[in-house]
Image (tube, helix red, strand yellow):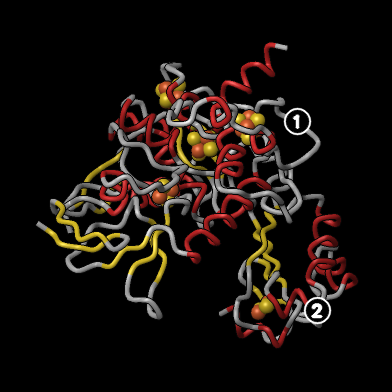
Amino acid sequence: MKKNTVLGLEVPCGPNGVSVITVLQAIQGYYGYLPEEALEKAARELKVPLIDFYSVATFYKNFRLAPQGRREVVTCTGTACHVRGSEKITEEISRTLGVDIGSTTEDGEYSLKCVNCVGACALAPLVIVDGRYYGQMTSLKVRRLFSDNPTKTEQTVSSGLSE
Amino acid sequence: MINLTMDGLKISVEPGATLLDVARFYGANIPTLCYDEALSPYGACRLCLVEIGEPGKSRLVSSCTYPAREKLNVRTNTVRVMQTRKMIIELYLATCPSSKTIQDLASKYGVTGVRFSPKNEECILCGLCVRMCEEQMQAKAIGFVDRGVNRRISTAFDRKSEQCRLCGACMYICPVCQARCQGPSEESTLCNACLNLSPPCLENNDHTLCYMDPCAACELKKKTNQ
Ligand code: SF4
Ligand code: SF4
Ligand code: SF4
Ligand code: FES
Ligand code: FES
């Protein structure tokens, strides 16, 4: 495949040049998120209006406009998890870590986000920390999970899922 | 040439024409909110819908984006079209009751009640401003941001845009920017004030039309002068 460089990053190139999505992916791949200055520079380099980048970046959930925390906490708010109280679980996590949905703690440690069903509904309500699945969560389990001593593995249900 | 039927009329049109072009050329009355002659059609508001296909298997399509096709049977004013259109106007009214354009549509198409609670939004996401900025002003300063219920019009990073030349064209074309006659924040969702005026020309002139738009514009003027 033909390659092109944007901001010195390699971007796969289609017949009509590079697409906005591939440029964003390359930038996020490098920085871990989409820094404003990088998008501005790329827009200038490619002579694309900045709003095109911003529209696409805000449309897809995979793109982040703020840096990600070192650890990623994901709660499922899909139907099964919702029915089994995922809202309370998310609130509890939000309170315990002091972070809003979709943002990162001040010390840059945890990011919290919600997804809709990850296909493990039998384990509802579900919390995923750095790719590790914790099923049948309760407020107590949440507090234990994020206490200073998170070695207790009793709450890890079928960690095989995470591999 | 493409041959089609519109409201029973046999019509030949150049390829490339949309059903809206055809309808407007032949004088069929089709309201639009997201269409402008100078901009590419977008098909967002659904107000321009018409019914195509044989009765029984017909469907509703947006005429501004539907190209004229051979042997198409188009109907622009069936009960189904009118009912759906009224429903759409009612929904827009609930979204943006402060818009004069939408209130006028309601008066014109006889929408006399709104069954939804007003949202008082400032935008119906018709995309006219975005297309205006890009296609006529060559600025591309604004666009759609986010998605789903959070979708909105904004500049990149919601900051003042370097591309924007403050031409004001986006506001000029916006169907929601103009406040309705009684001002933006009236208590009732529906205005319909025009409906309560009887056109005076009918009493005075037997055979003439005044061509004022809206009808009773003369009365409206007197009212506001008082
Ligand atoms: S008074 Fe008539 S013209 Fe004015 S907003 Fe109401 S319906 Fe529209
Ligand atoms: S005022 Fe700015 S955003 Fe609006 S059409 Fe003009 S250039 Fe575009
Ligand atoms: S701001 Fe006005 S023109 Fe732009 S999308 Fe919203 S309603 Fe349409
Ligand atoms: S609803 Fe949570 S995993 Fe399916
Ligand atoms: S004018 Fe056709 S959908 Fe809006």
Please determine whether, in this image, residue B139 is positioned above or below residue B110.
Answer: above
Residue located 82% across and 67% down the image: A89
Q: Position of residue B61 (x, y in %)?
A: 39, 62
Please determine whether, in this image, residue B49 is positioned above or below residue A152.
Answer: above
Between A18 and B148, the one nearer to me in the picture: B148
Q: Nearer the viewer, mark 1 or mark 2?
A: 1
Identify the residue at the far right of this view.
Answer: A140
Q: Position of residue B162 (x, y in %)?
A: 43, 20
Q: Which circle marks residue B185 in the picture?
A: 1
Q: Position of residue A117 (x, y in %)?
A: 63, 75
Mark 1–mark 2 distance (CA, rounded to whole Å): 42 Å
Identify the residue at the far front of this view.
Answer: B206
Q: Amino acid at mark 1?
A: Ser
Identify the residue at the far left of this view.
Answer: B1
- Asked where in the image residue B186 lies, by quadrant, the reply is top right
- Asked where in the image residue B122 lies, by quadrant, the reply is top right
Q: Chain of mark 1?
A: B
Residue located 68% across and 39% down the image: B192
Q: Classify the position of the N terminus of chain A by image quarter.
A: bottom left
Please determine whether, in this image, residue A140 is positioned above or below residue B219.
Answer: below
Please determine whether, in this image, residue B137 is positioned above or below residue B8.
Answer: above
The residue tagged 2 is A84
Q: Position of residue B225 (x, y in %)?
A: 68, 11
Between B222 and A95, the one nearer to me in the picture: B222
Q: Amino acid at mark 2?
A: Arg
Element class at badge 1: loop
**In the image, is B174 to the left or to the right of B196?**
left
